[in-house]
Image (spheres, rainbow, N blue to C red):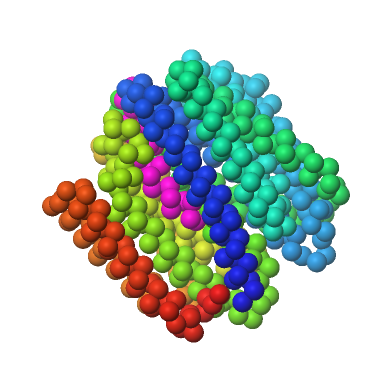
Amino acid sequence: MANLKSLVKDTAIYGLSSIVGRFLNYLLVPLYTHYMPKESGDYGVSTNIYAYTALILVLLTFGMETTLFRFANEEKYKPDSVFSTAMVTVGVLTALFLILIFGFIDPISNALGYEAHPDYLLMMAVVVALDALQALPFSYLRFQKRAIRFASLKLLFIVVNIGLNLICFVWLGKTSVFYVFFINLMCTAFVTLFFVPDLFRIHWHFDSTLLRRMLSYSWPILILGIAGILNQVADKIVFPLVYPDQMEANVQLGIYGSCVKIAMIMAMITQAFRYAYEPIVFAKSKDGDKSEYYAAAMKYFIVFTLLAFLCVMGWMPLLKFIIGADYREGLAVVPIVMAAEIMMGVYFNLSFWYKLIDKTIYGAWFSLIGCIVLFAVNILFIPKYGYMACAWGGVAGYGTAMILSYVIGQQKNPIPYPMKDILLYVALTALIFAAMQFISAKTSETLCLVVNTLLIVAFAAIIFIRDFRHPSNSHLQI
């Protein structure tokens, strides 16, 4: 099927930019964790401030990325009109945000505990403003199926960012977290310039009637986005606020933040899949075989994320060197955070039933409830269990939202997900993971790597034999 071929091709391109980019960014983790000592708490400061910027970015984009796809696919609207209306909206919100931050920087920095470093907040405010202004042009590239340009610009940012960090930390010996934020600002501004020619080619037309429809569609997505991003960053925001020892909080948050980086391969896969899948879902919404397509896509998303989970856990004796030795005490959070990311990916796949029938309010409620669960776990258990509570909070929050979306979705817009196959692969993954844990406790790291690799190959072979050797057995035919 043509749509699936497009999905595979675009996922490969988006995945290349995402996975290669994240891999290159991993070079910064050993750099930071080597040059910024654990006791300084600088990596914890970075983790905390980037959590705030992620939340603010969702607020500024106001759900307009998904809304762009929804209305640009309607025949009654010209895509340029949809883009320009959304872009003006985001631009106004961004301008108001910058006025607020620069006008009230002292009380804001005091409230967040950065009274000695308001410059950190000012730099990152400009970064998140530029990111918000880039978000819709990047989405428009996806809508136009310009995956190569999309990936090129994403990789350009990463390569320049890494190069400047290496020069700053290794050559010049500048090891303060200040330079992390300053370099990010320079790179973000640099990439923004590449969108200027595209913006001049747009036929700008602001449609107030269209805006009312877009806002009606997007505000539940905004709530959904806020709750969703809080599920990802709330632990890093809450941690310094509830941890008993404020001086130690940044140290512990640095350990947690660095170890979570290893688990982010799951976020890469989910993001790459989303970039390619979202435009196709809306375009395919009128096809007769859409339910079978969505069901098969869900199955294979889960299968490949489970394979990625086993690869990360099986090769942990090598991957642990991504972070500095002082930070490795937190590696126990990796499988928990990866499980939470899988649940988040499943939840994203489940979300299309209410997006396609314009009932995005359901997603807002699901995410809000999941977010409440996550906050409760973090606030109640961080004081006693530290960052382990953060990891389990993610599982609780995403798990709640995922289950609610599945149960209610099957009532409102049922899709025949192959639950028997999915549960079989989940159980097999759990069994192999348990075997890996047992082997790691009983053997050397070298032998452990060999055995784990064999187990991963066996899992991949089972996938191939059951689902790809006989394509007629699957709805997802390439």
* Relative height, residue 334 to residue 431 (above, below): above
For the point 61% across and 60% down, the residue is 10
* The image quarter in which residue 125 lies: top right
Residue 331 rendering spot, x and y as whole percentages: 29, 42
Please tell me which residue lies in front, 194 or 59.
Answer: 194
Q: Is residue 405 left or right of residue 453?
A: right
Q: Residue at x 72, y 32 (%)?
A: 95
Name the residue rendered at 38%, 77% in the picture.
Answer: 465
Residue at the far top in the pictured view: 116
Q: Is residue 463 above or below residue 47?
A: below
Q: Which residues are magenta?
A: 246-270
Horizontal side of residue 68 vs 442, given as left or right:
right
Instruction: Identify the image quadrant of the N terminus.
Output: bottom right
Residue drawn at (21%, 48%) of the image: 445
- Does residue 97 appear in the picture of this structure? no
User: Would residue 294 be seen by someone viewing this image from the given angle?
Assistant: yes
In magenta stretch: residue 254: yes
Give the x, y percent position of residue 76: 83, 65
Magenta run includes residue 414: no
Q: Position of residue 450 (x, y in %)?
A: 24, 56
Q: Which quadrant holds the C terminus?
A: bottom right
Q: Position of residue 20 (x, y in %)?
A: 51, 47
Q: Main secondary structure of the magenta part?
A: helix
Residue occupying the far bottom of the picture: 472
* Front residue of this view, candidates 315 and 85: 315
Q: Nearer the viewer, residue 26 or 89?
A: 26
